[in-house]
Image (cartoon, rainbow, N blue to C red):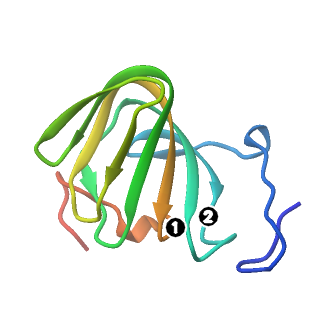
Amino acid sequence: MDAKKDDVSCVVRHLEEVEAASCPCGASVRLLTAQNSSQLGLHVTRIKDSKKHYHKKTTEAYYILEGSGYLEAGDKTIVVSPGTCVLIPKGVPHRGWGDFKTIVVCVPPFDSKDEFLLDEKEP
């Protein structure tokens, strides 16, 4: 059952019912998006070798569910494994590599126009 954006009822989404989208991080199942809420987004993302990027408006929290690898955020390289949580403030370049599945909470919700690859010029 999906609710309209900012409806007072709850939103229920099931992982197996949402198609994965390609993104600079790999494959992302976007369970909660701006279509559901103006407050936050929630994605389940499989990361193997992502492209370095940043967001001007979005802060992200990564919570590692399974697998292992590395998450580069700014000038830090963090070893990640299940149970690791990393907060990435807006404006901080980041990328991951290895093979891990993570929950990504986005505040505000993800917006493809707010994703800037460091190899590419901004629009």
Q: Residues within 10 Å of mark 1 (few under 14, many from 20)?
A: many
Alpha carbons under labels 1 and 2: distance apart:
6 Å
Picture layout, residue 104 above or below residue 98:
below
Q: Residue at x 78, y 76 (%)?
A: 4
Give how far across and how far down residue 59 sits, in percent: 37, 62
Give how far across and how far down residue 119 sits, in percent: 17, 51
Residue 20 falls left or right of residue 87: right
Name the residue that disc number 2 marks.
33
Q: Residue at x 79, y 43 (%)?
A: 17
| Image quarter (top left, top right, bottom left or bottom right) of the C terminus | bottom left
Name the residue that disc number 1 marks.
109
Residue 108 falls left or right of residue 92: right
**Circle 1: element type:** loop
Q: Residue at x 24, y 32 (%)?
A: 78
In the rendered image, the residue lying farthest to the right is: 1
Give amino acid for label 2.
Thr
Q: Residue at x 59, y 77 (%)?
A: 38
Mark 1 and mark 2 residues within 8 Å of each other at the beta carbon: yes
Give how far across and how far down residue 79 sits, in percent: 28, 25
Picture layout, residue 100 above or below residue 107:
above
Q: Nearer the viewer, residue 46 or 85?
A: 85
In the picture, residue 41 is in which quadrant?
bottom right
Give amino acid for label 1.
Pro
Residue 107 falls left or right of residue 14: left
How many marks are shown on the rendered structure? 2
Picture layout, residue 113 above or below residue 83:
below
Q: Nearer the viewer, residue 120 or 43?
A: 43
**Circle 2: element type:** loop
| Sequence-first disc among 1 and 2 | 2
Q: Residues within 10 Å of mark 2 (few under 14, many from 20)?
A: some
